[in-house]
Amino acid sequence: MKGKTCCNAMRYHSSSHCPVHSSPFECPDWLILHDEATGNYGIIIHDGGQSYIKIDYCPWCGHKLGSEKRLFRK
């Protein structure tokens, strides 16, 4: 995630960079995906595919998610 985030937990879980796995879908520690093309956020489904469940609110602080323009850093 390149822009600002709503909280430290969201920043950590959506911008993990694993030295072992090249894809967030392969890394079991990468929990949140930020789709920069759509601006959507989602919880990654770690089942071997590339699916995620879209979320509208931060699971940690409750801030409304969406466009990076609406996010802020606490």
Image (spheres, rainbow, N blue to C red):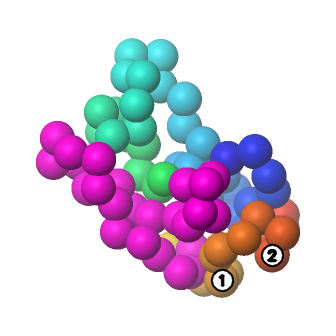
Looking at the rendered structure, the kind of residue marked 2 is Arg
Q: Earlier in the sequence, mark 2 or mark 1?
A: 1
Element carrying mark 2: helix
**Which of the image's four quarters has the C terminus?**
bottom right
Circle 2 Cα neighbour tier, 10 Å, few/some/many (<14 / 14–19 / ≥20): few
Query: Going by the picture, which residue comes out furthest to the top?
Result: 20
Residue under the point 34% across and 60% down: 52
Looking at the rendered structure, the kind of residue marked 1 is Lys
Residue at which label 2 appears? 70
Residue at which label 1 appears? 64
Mark drawn on residue 11: none
Q: Are marks 2 and 1 in contact (CB under 8 Å)?
A: yes
Residue 2 position, x and y percent, is 75, 45
Answer with the quarter of the image where residue 48 lies. Answer: top left
The span shown in magenta is 34-58
The front one of 58 and 25 is 25
Residue 43 position, x and y percent, is 39, 62
- Position of 33 relative to 73 (above/below): above
